[in-house]
């Protein structure tokens, strides 16, 4: 059953998320509906030699080759017996289509990002865990998984490549203050390192949209506002406050609205791009495009400086 995104995606900027709840070994897990392309009955797959142990193989529905990840094996390290009527969740993010084998789908719940809590580091292997949050959906505690991290661990070449920045060669130092809202500690580090290599020396990180908004709101009336922030980079999926809500709040504020906002997320597709444009995002990039992000920052900072001169 293919999911029609037009009918299921939420209104922009409401700070809500729709979670598809599924089971593996009786445990409840969740995925953001925005990542789901369709649900299919599990099919026979062709094993691939020398693949990661969690890669079950490939199959070809409608003439498209799709990699299948055995999510049960990835999460437990055990080969679980495949049962009748298991399902493939076919996902689309970071411009990739990947299927994940699960045992059952238990429905969809709409909740606020405010109600999603970050799991304790002792339960998630420190900063490197694959659980992005814990939520209560229809009376059940659901672990929301970081599917980008799962895929990046299995296929590192699909994640941010710092070599894209190194290939730019020597670049001038830039002291323009940048604000980043990103809940993944691993990705936050990678983005920071990429920007540092690109010459950006004044970067302030926040772990979610709420923390970033609290800071921006606190300085919004300062005379030296534009000496404290020149540009914001935000993920979409974050506990407390998502990137769409953060973008809306910034663009609705009389002074903050002049700041460029770049949405840097694995979720960017045609529908999400429309949502971001509606909210006033200046640019939207999918996460592996770190080299493109650097060029976009350069261009938007030049435009911002021109805007500020015109305001003066």
Image: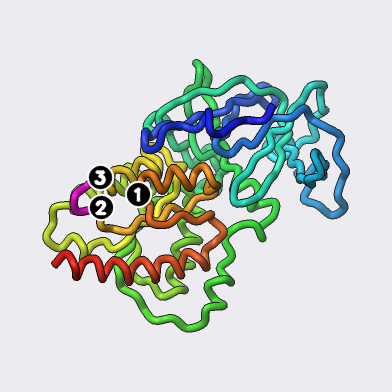
Locate residue 250, reporting x and y percent. Answer: 28, 48
Locate residue 159, reporting x and y percent. Answer: 60, 57
Circle 2/circle 3 CB separation < 8 Å? yes
Residue at left 25%, top 45%?
Answer: 252
Report which quarter residue 67 is drawn in: top right
Locate residue 234, reporting x and y percent. Answer: 40, 51
Say what secondary structure mark 3 lies in. helix
Residue at left 50%, top 61%?
Answer: 190
Per the rendering, the mark at residue 305 is none
Say what secondary structure mark 2 lies in. helix
Instruction: Say which label, 2 or 3, has the lower sequence index.
Output: 3
Q: Residues within 10 Å of mark 3 (few under 14, many from 20)?
A: few
The image quadrant where one finds the N terminus is: top right
Total number of numbered discs in the rendering: 3
Q: Nearer the viewer, residue 78 or 226?
A: 226
Q: Nearer the viewer, residue 312 or 35?
A: 312
Q: Is residue 223 left or right of residue 102?
A: left
Find disc 2 in the rendering and name its residue. Answer: 257
Extent of the magenta region: 252-257
Residue at left 44%, top 42%?
Answer: 275
Instruction: Say which label, 2 or 1, has the lower sequence index.
Output: 2
Say what secondary structure mark 1 lies in. loop
In reply to whether residue 289 is colored magenta, the answer given is no
Per the rendering, the mark at residue 280 is 1
Residue 44 vertical position relative to residue 200 in the rendered view, above or below: above
Circle 2/circle 1 CB separation < 8 Å? yes
Find disc 3 in the rendering and name its residue. Answer: 252
Report which quarter residue 63 is drawn in: top right
């Amino acid at each position: 059953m293919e999911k029609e995104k037009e009918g299921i995606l939420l209104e922009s900027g409401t700070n809500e998320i729709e979670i598809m709840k599924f089971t593996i070994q009786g445990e409840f897990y969740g995925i953001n509906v925005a990542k789901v392309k369709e649900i299919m009955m599990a099919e026979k797959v062709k094993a691939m030699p020398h693949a990661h142990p969690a890669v079950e193989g490939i199959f070809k529905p409608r003439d498209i080759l799709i990699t299948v990840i055995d999510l049960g094996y990835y999460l437990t390290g055990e080969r679980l017996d495949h049962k009748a009527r298991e399902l493939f969740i076919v996902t689309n993010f970071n411009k990739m289509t990947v299927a994940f084998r699960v045992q059952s789908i238990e429905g969809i719940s709409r909740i606020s990002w405010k109600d999603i809590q970050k799991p304790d580091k002792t339960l998630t292997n420190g900063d490197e865990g694959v659980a992005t949050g814990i939520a209560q959906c229809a009376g059940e505690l659901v672990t929301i998984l970081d599917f980008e991290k799962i895929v990046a661990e299995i296929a590192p070449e699909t994640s941010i490549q710092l070599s894209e920045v190194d290939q730019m060669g020597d670049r001038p130092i830039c002291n323009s203050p940048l604000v980043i809202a990103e809940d993944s500690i691993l990705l936050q580090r990678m983005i920071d390192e990429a920007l540092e290599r690109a010459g950006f020396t004044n970067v302030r990180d926040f772990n979610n949209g709420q923390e970033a908004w609290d800071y921006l709101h606190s300085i919004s009336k300062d005379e030296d506002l534009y000496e404290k922030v020149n540009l914001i980079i935000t993920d979409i999926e974050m506990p407390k406050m998502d990137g769409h809500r953060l973008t809306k709040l910034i663009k609705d504020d009389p002074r903050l609205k002049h700041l460029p906002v770049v949405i840097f997320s694995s979720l960017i597709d045609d529908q999400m791009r429309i949502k971001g444009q509606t909210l006033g995002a200046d640019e939207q990039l999918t996460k592996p495009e770190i080299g493109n992000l650097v060029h976009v920052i350069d261009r938007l900072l030049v435009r911002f400086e021109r805007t500020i001169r015109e305001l003066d």
